[in-house]
């Protein structure tokens, strides 16, 4: 009887009143002690209201049925494919939508609908993977901010690959405690590429120079990242660098000239396919025997070998611990020694190496000056003329 009156009344009632009445009927369906016939009639009336011309009516049903596991499945599925603002409550909360439904909804490509799915509590990794693969930047951001979503490392890497150039995505990723060091390095690469593109597009620098500066900045950041990486995670980072084409002679030389011997040794072990313990023994052999053979087996270019040889000899003679800057900055004294020795050889084939070493020397000098000035300000030091001359030297 109540349903009959409802059906007669809604034919002429205003949209707002229809929405309120539909919400009341939906709650009665869920929580009132209706007879079977009245329950069937109420469900039929609610199904009919899916065709109401006003979105307020369907929105009212979506709010009532969104989080309920005894809601009519037909109505829930219809609401899930309604316009995004109506579907959102159902997509976020309905337990009646199975993984296959959610994957299909994500595949529609509508950002608002994808974002609603990404906000679901306890989202399984299969749905997270679908969002990472085809979801919009907005939905991927919602997914990363959903701390109860299960996201496997592959999906995180896919988000980095697709949207790592966006600052909000990078910030959300870097806030995660479970971010692998290889993923952090990928974010460094994305950032350097984005900056290079930005500078080149504004014509602030020639494109080639902008990309070289960004590349060297990426190398510096990679060595700094490696210096803060626990020993057990260093080899996965090196494998990532190798697979992505970043484990170059320049990066390995920078690590050695920065005093990061562990990165240098692990890189040689990875490239030469030699046990790390054996590599360590060869590198730290004061006689230098076997180092050239190890170097060649690693497939590094012969033209760069003089720099590696001199750097290893410098390590044996003086060590790196006396230089400022930790294990992430080039060591000026070592770089200048290597440069001087390589300049004495002067074969034409190492001309590019000399150019690289000169850039390293300039970078190391600037970094040393910055550290000196920082320390000077921090300690409020006022020196004599003689002390200033000594410091400047």
Image (cartoon, rainbow, N blue to C red):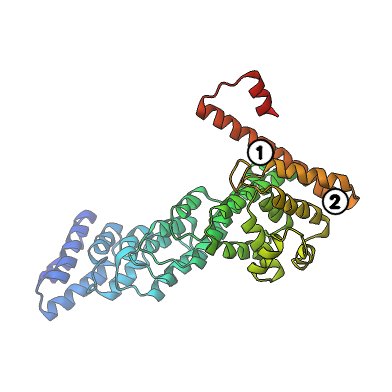
Q: Does 77 sit left or right of 192 as displayed?
A: left
Mark 1–mark 2 distance (CA, rounded to whole Å): 35 Å
**Where is residue 361 drawn, in percent x and y?**
73, 40
Q: Quadrant of residue 385?
A: top right
Q: Does 308 sit left or right of 129 as displayed?
A: right
**Where is residue 223 drawn, in percent x and y?**
61, 52
Examine the rendering and report whether any part of residue 68 can be seen. Answer: yes
Q: Which secondary structure lies at badge 2?
A: helix
Residue furthest to the bottom: 36
Q: Residues within 10 Å of mark 1 (few under 14, many from 20)?
A: few
Q: Residues within 10 Å of mark 2 (few under 14, many from 20)?
A: some
Which residue is the site of mark 1? 202
| Quadrant of the drawing holding the N terminus | bottom left
| Residue displayed at 66% across by 61% down | 265
| Residue displayed at 76% across by 59% down | 287
Residue contact between numbered discs 1 and 2, judged by CB atoms under 8 Å: no
**Where is residue 374 drawn, in percent x and y?**
56, 31
| Quadrant of the drawing holding the C terminus | top right
In the rendered view, tell whether residue 142 sits above or below residue 272.
above
**Closest to the observer: 322 or 233?**
322
**Closest to the observer: 60 or 187?**
187
Q: How many marks?
A: 2
Which residue is the site of mark 2? 350
Examine the rendering and report whether any part of residue 209 can be seen. Answer: no
| Marks 1 and 2, the one that precedes in the sequence | 1
In the rendered view, tell whether residue 36 sits above or below residue 257.
below
């Amino acid at each position: 009887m109540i349903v009959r009156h409802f059906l007669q009344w809604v034919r002429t009632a205003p949209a707002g009143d229809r929405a309120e009445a539909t919400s009341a009927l939906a709650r009665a369906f869920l929580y009132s002690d209706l007879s079977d016939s009245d329950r069937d009639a109420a469900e039929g009336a609610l199904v009919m209201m899916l065709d109401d011309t006003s979105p307020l009516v369907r929105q009212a049903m979506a709010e009532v049925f969104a989080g309920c596991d005894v809601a009519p499945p037909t109505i829930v599925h219809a609401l899930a494919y309604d316009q995004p603002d109506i579907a959102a409550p159902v997509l976020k909360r309905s337990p009646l939508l199975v993984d296959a439904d959610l994957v299909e909804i994500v595949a529609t490509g509508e950002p608002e609908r994808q974002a609603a799915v990404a906000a679901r509590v306890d989202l399984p990794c299969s749905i997270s993977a679908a969002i990472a693969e085809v979801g919009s930047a907005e939905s991927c951001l919602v997914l990363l901010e959903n701390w109860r979503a299960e996201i496997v490392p592959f999906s995180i890497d896919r988000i980095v690959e697709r949207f790592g150039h966006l600052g909000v995505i990078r910030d959300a990723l870097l806030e995660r405690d479970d971010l692998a060091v290889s993923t952090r390095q990928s974010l460094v690469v994305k950032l350097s590429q984005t900056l290079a593109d930005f500078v080149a597009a504004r014509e602030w620098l020639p494109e080639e120079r902008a990309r070289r500066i960004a590349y060297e900045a990426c190398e510096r950041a990679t060595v700094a990242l490696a210096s803060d990486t626990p020993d057990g995670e260093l080899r996965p980072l090196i494998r990532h660098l190798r697979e992505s084409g970043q484990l170059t002679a320049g990066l390995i030389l920078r690590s050695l000239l920065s005093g990061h011997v562990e990165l240098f040794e692990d890189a040689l072990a990875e490239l030469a396919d030699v046990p790390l313990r054996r590599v360590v023994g060869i590198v730290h052999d004061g006689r230098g025997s076997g180092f050239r053979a190890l170097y060649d087996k690693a497939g590094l270019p012969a033209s760069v070998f003089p720099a590696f040889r001199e750097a290893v000899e410098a390590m044996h003679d003086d060590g790196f611990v006396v230089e400022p800057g930790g294990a992430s900055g080039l060591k000026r004294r070592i770089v200048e020694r290597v440069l001087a020795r390589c300049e004495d050889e002067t074969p034409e084939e190492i001309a590019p190496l000399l150019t690289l070493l000169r850039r390293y020397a300039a970078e190391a000098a600037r970094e040393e000056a910055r550290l000196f000035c920082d320390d000077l300000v921090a300690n409020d030091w006022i020196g004599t003329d003689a002390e200033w001359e000594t410091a400047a030297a």
